[in-house]
Amino acid sequence: MKNTAPVQRTVSPVDGSVYVERPLASDQEIEAALAASILAQQRWKRVPVAERSAIVRRMVEWCVARADALGEELTRQMGRPIAYTPNEIRRGFQERALYMAGIAEAALSDIAITPGRRFIRREPLGVVLVLAPWNYPWLTSVNAIVPALLAGNSVILKMAQQTPLVAERYAEAFAAAGLPPGVFQYLHLDHAQTARVIGDPRIAFVAFTGSVEGGHAVQRAAAQRFIATGLELGGKDPAYVRADADLSSTIENLVDGSYFNSGQSCCGIERIYVDKKLFRPFVDGFVELTKKYRLGNPLDAQTTLGPVVRTEAAEAVRAQIREALGKGGKALIDPKSFPAHKEGTPYLAPQVLVDVDHSMQVMIEESFGPVVGIMSVDSDEQAIKLMNDSRYGLTASIWTQDADAAVRIGDHVDTGTWFMNRCDYLDPALAWTGVKDSGRGCTLSKLGLEAFTRPKSFHLKLK
């Protein structure tokens, strides 16, 4: 009998072919996963934290040992050059998971209150639903999956349609690491099914990474229940280049921060404000380095810039560029200098725009593609005003030799993370969080572990 279950298809941006097909979970499969998660979590929360950490470490070892294979299938799913995809696992994924495993025992220990026998115990929340995106599927998901498990929760992962194999590989890795059955599971779901799972009383917490619109959908689905949601949403992250910046290093890092992963990073650089004294040399150097990218098939080891995730995403970026040019902006890159650039495809040349302002979408709305606008500023105060003129607030960076000035200016910028002389990076020892439409809650650091627990107070009167 022919299977008529709905199917999700992953269309590879590499060549437009269907790379993965998976049936969506049935109602019976969803129910079985939820029931298994509840039972497994009751046992898992009794497992010592040191043992949980050891399992996480073995899971990481399994993934790192297979980084090349996992990287290649990631390239085929979402288009990042194969020169870079294995490093998502070897570097950021491994760094974050091992850091969290390393601090778990101390971070989750009881908080003693003296005098007397009083203490606060951190208890797991229950079943955590992780909704992870395609752009950095290993890096974003590990931020929630690992601390949730370390804290004693069970996890159900719903991965974006573009990268379903990541969820399946997690399951293989955790099974190889000895994680008890039911503690980690994944489901392939559509939007309606996801909303129903969020509304199920057995879900205790939802960790979502994605668009602002997706965050609103999660909130609506959870609105009838008293559960917390962790939301990492969009960004329009700015950089401010002061007059005392190291020009060469600043250009190198900001070009990389703008175009790595074809600009498809929530904390990538999307707008740059440069002191007028450095504006011309900065722009010239930025354009010169941008032209050195090689746009092409991401399975070619020489490619440094792959396609964006789908043609519709490329068209959205092209529309922002056209709107900026129509309002007086100037494009400094000729797309014809990138032979692989082709209208009507996901292959999109990088672009640098000047003569831009905040009347243009490219300077105020998330682009999520290989385009950046650069403006000249007269002062720190003007830079602060422009950086804050956004509905987003995930990260922002300053490029200067004056650390005191960096702290002083950072105190006035509405952002979750403030960088000096670096960008587009998550330090696992620091809380990863956003303000305004960039979301709420946090992951990573000691605070990120605590986010997957609830406090329970013990007050023991002995006499």
Image (cartoon, rainbow, N blue to C red):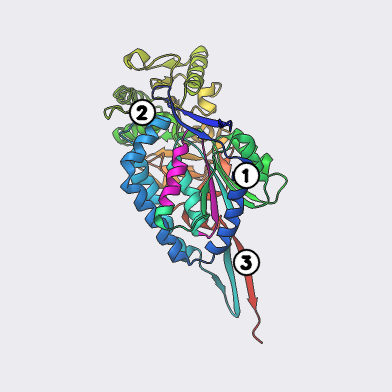
Q: Which image quarter holds the N terminus?
A: top right
Q: Residues within 10 Å of mark 1 (few under 14, many from 20)?
A: few
In this view of the protein, which residue sits in the foreground, 413 or 365? 365
Between the residue at mark 1 and the residue at mark 2, the CA separation in whole angstroms equals 62 Å
Q: Which residue is mark 2?
A: 278
Q: Which residues are magenta?
A: 151-174
Q: Quadrant of residue 213?
A: top right
Q: Assign a secondary structure to mark 1.
A: helix
Please tell me which residue is depicted at 55% across the width and 48% down the height of the picture: 156
Pinpoint residue 337: horizontal percent, then vertical percent. Answer: 32, 15
Tag on residue 28?
A: 1
Of the residues tagged 1 and 3, which is closer to the observer?
1
Residue type at mark 1? Gln
Nearest to N terminus: mark 1 or mark 3: 1
Observer-side mark, 2 or 3, equals 3
Instruction: Inspect the image, locate mark 3, and give the three-letter code of the amino acid beneath it.
Output: Lys
